[in-house]
Amino acid sequence: DMGLAFNHGPMGRDSCLDLLCGPDTWKENSKKLYPNSSCKKICKFRNDTVNILKSMGPDAPPEKRLGYLTKQEIEKEGSPVFEFNIYYSINSRYPKRRYINEDFYKGLDKRVEKFLAHVDECIKNHGIEHVLPNKF
């Protein structure tokens, strides 16, 4: 993900969670080139991918969620992932701040939840046969 997923910390600003649109700088450049356009999020996904994320989503038991599973793998590995990172505060480049690791695992769960809500909205608007086709 080129390091942009946690650009503003584990939860980020709302635009950081604007899934399937890219980072703010991409959207800003698009607005300059195409002033009347806005991000049109994709609404077609592989059913297997959605099912895997559902199995790790907000309805899953806590020990099956993506955040918990990621934490377990990072602890097994024994290498620091988030410990030395410094992040921008919301709406500012300074002061920079650090977060506790647990915040990132919660952030992963929040992203899965938001993605699954987007899939549900796509299904509502376009029908399951168009969003989760049998053949991709």
Image (cartoon, rainbow, N blue to C red):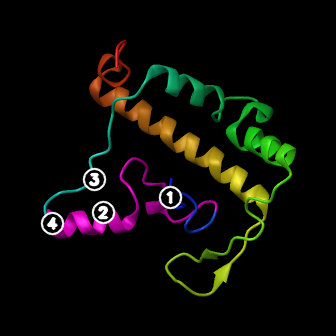
Which of the 4 image quadrants contains residue 73?
top right
Q: Are the two marked residues, 3 and 1, in contact with CB atoms closer than 8 angstroms?
A: no
Q: Where is 30 relative to 92, above or below?
A: above
Nearer the viewer's eye, disc 2 or disc 1? Answer: 1
> Which residues fall within the magenta stretch?
10-34
Q: Residue at x 55, y 66 (%)?
A: 7
Q: Say whether disc 3 or disc 4 marks the residue closer to the N-terminus.
A: 4
Disc 4 target residue: 33
Indicate the amino acid at tag 4: Leu
Kindly state the secondary structure of the residue where label 1 is placed: loop
Q: CA distance from mark 2 to mark 3?
A: 7 Å
Secondary structure under the numbered disc 2 in the rendered image: helix
Residue 106 position within the rendered picture, expressed as x and y whole percent measured from the top left: 70, 51
CA gap, disc 4 and disc 2: 10 Å
Q: Which residue is mark 3?
A: 39
Q: CA distance from mark 2 to mark 1?
A: 16 Å
- Residue 13 screen position, x and y as percent: 51, 65
Q: Which residue is mark 1?
A: 2
Q: Nearer the viewer, residue 81 or 38?
A: 81
Q: Earlier in the sequence, mark 4 or mark 2?
A: 2
Which amino acid is tagged 2? Lys
Between marks 3 and 4, how big is the CA–CA gap? 13 Å
Write the residue at 34% across / 25% down. Answer: 131
Tell me which numbered mark, 3 or 1, is placed earlier along the sequence: 1
